[in-house]
Image (tube, helix red, strand yellow):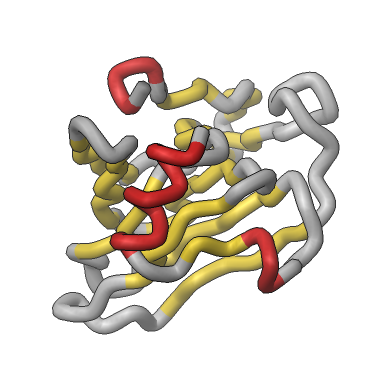
Amino acid sequence: MVDNIKLIEIPKITDPRGNLAVIEKDTLPYEVQRVYYLYDVPSDAYRGGHSHKECMEFLVALSGSFEVVLDDGTSKKRVTLNKPNKGLLIPTGIWRELENFSSGAVCLVLASHEYEEEDYIRTYDTFKASLIDT
């Protein structure tokens, strides 16, 4: 399952004045319900450490870089995000951890659902057990 996760090219308009990246309703397979961003994350810290039951997320490194470790319970994949015109679509049922944030890194997240604590799987053991139940 993690082998199928890919970076999505964000359409951009190039101009002598700079680039403009555009995320419109057809860019993602869902309507965005929540937008948030991570910044000032210390380089030795990590974020994430959870999975979602229903929420999909699209991550973009607006500035700097960071790594996303994806885990489907069987295999893992590490993806480096470091370009503001490429994003990572994370489907449901994937454990994710974000780490190795560069100085000044900003991670934009476009989520398919509003925040609901019940949608989170917050421990890896519970995540692994949920895979057996499906």
Outermost residue on the top side: it is 4
Task: Work out whether residue 119 or residue 21 is closer to the camera in this orientation and state it.
Answer: 119
Instruction: Point out residue 48 in the picture as x, y percentages from the top left corner.
Output: 40, 65
Residue 122 lies left or right of residue 20; in this view the side is: left
Residue 14 lies left or right of residue 115; in this view the side is: left
Compared to residue 25, the image places residue 26 above or below, namely: above
Instruction: Point out residue 75 in the picture as x, y percentages from the top left corner.
Output: 19, 31
Compared to residue 99, the image places residue 130 above or below, namely: above
- The residue shown at (30%, 61%) is 125
Q: Where on the picture, by quarter, is residue 94?
A: top left
Task: Work out whether residue 2 or residue 134 is closer to the camera in this orientation and state it.
Answer: 134
Compared to residue 54, the image places residue 120 above or below, namely: below
Outermost residue on the front side: it is 133
Instruction: Point out residue 46 in the picture as x, y percentages from the top left corner.
Output: 27, 72
Instruction: Point out residue 14 in the picture as x, y percentages from the top left corner.
Output: 58, 24
Tally of marks: 0
Compared to residue 123, the image places residue 23 above or below, namely: above
- The residue shown at (20%, 39%) is 78
- The residue shown at (41%, 39%) is 131
- The residue shown at (28%, 41%) is 71
Residue 77 lies left or right of residue 34; in this view the side is: left
Image quadrant holding the N terminus, namely: top left
Q: Where on the picture, by quarter, is residue 81?
A: top left
Residue 50 lies left or right of residue 111; in this view the side is: left
